[in-house]
Amino acid sequence: MNPAGRNRCPRVADASIVQQTPTHFKDTPFAPNHEARRVGSTSYIDDSLRSFLVKLGGRSPEPAGGAALALAGASAAALVSLTCHAGLGDSDLGAEHEALRACQVRSADLSERIQKLIDQDVHAYRAVLQALRMPQATDDQRRARQTSLDDALARASEVPLEVARASLEILALAVRLEPSVRPVVVGDLAASVHLAEAAIRGSLRNARVNAGAMVDASRAQTIIQAAEDLGREANRHASLAHQALGDRGLPG
């Protein structure tokens, strides 16, 4: 979502809507990393997620695309953690065990980081709205309004860039992890790759569109260039990931 086409920047959920992922896991290889994963649980869709999805499809200006993309990135990180847990169940990994543990912890940290960015995104969106509502009856007021609006649009571009950066790291983790992934969870790793790609590409588009609505062309170009650089890195890692997954029998 963006203000250039619809006078809006990426909308996100309130912190209370999206559950937080812990930054560490228990020592048991398949310990749950979320309260929803309980023995005997019959549903993984709790009230918080239902509320989020209802608001996503409702009339409120938030949450919307930015929130959905961030949730995709956080989900990608969780799936990388899942594949690490599966490998940690092997007793003959040796040195790979510590690498998998580090990857699992890092993916959990990235999931939490993206969830925090969801909350920052909503504040950025609200700042754009506040700037748009500023008075513009005089030249001084118009200049003050434009300065505030450019500042808000810059922040509304920087937050999705951060989502893209975190999701790119998730994609890079998936590439490094692929050779040691157990066959039973290769499909889960593939899902993480697709989700991370969606989070990256959608967030980069939001950043470009919001930057394009700025008057300060130099500042906007810096943001757009950062998005282009991230996009090239994403293309490179995605190509590597899909090639590796194709070699494991999962083309496309």
Image: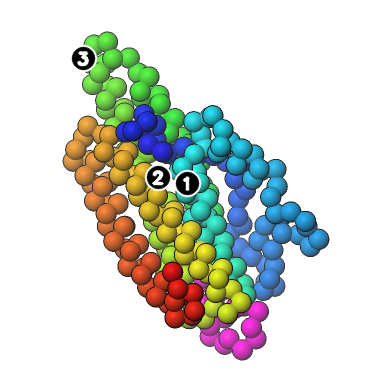
Kindly indicate whether the residue at mark 3 contacts the one at mark 2 (C-beta within 8 angstroms).
no
Q: Quadrant of the N terminus?
A: top left
Asked if residue 13 lies left or right of residue 10, the reply is right
1 or 3: tag closer to the N-terminus: 1
Q: Amino acid at mark 2?
A: Val
For the residue pair 234 and 134, the one nearer the viewer reads as: 234
Q: Position of residue 73 (x, y in %)?
A: 49, 55
2 or 3: tag closer to the N-terminus: 3
Q: Secondary structure at mark 1?
A: helix
Q: Report the residue that reaches farthest toward the top.
A: 137
Question: Which region shows up in magenta?
Answer: 87-105
Question: Which residue is depicted at the point 59% across and 45% down?
Answer: 18
| Res. 120 visible in picture | no
Kindly indicate whether the residue at mark 2 contacts the one at mark 1 (C-beta within 8 angstroms).
yes
Residue 54 placement: quadrant: top right
Asked if the stretch drawn in magenta spans residue 82, the answer is no
Of the numbered discs in the image, which one, if any, rests on residue 139? 3
For the residue pair 193 and 89, the one nearer the viewer reads as: 193
Q: Secondary structure at mark 3?
A: helix
Q: Amino acid at mark 1?
A: Leu
Q: Which residue is mark 2?
A: 159
Q: Is residue 35 above or below residue 245?
A: above
Q: Position of residue 251 (x, y in %)?
A: 45, 73
Of the numbered discs in the image, which one, if any, rests on residue 117? 1
Decide whether the magenta segment is chiefly helix, strand or loop.
helix
For the residue pair 203 and 33, the one nearer the viewer reads as: 203
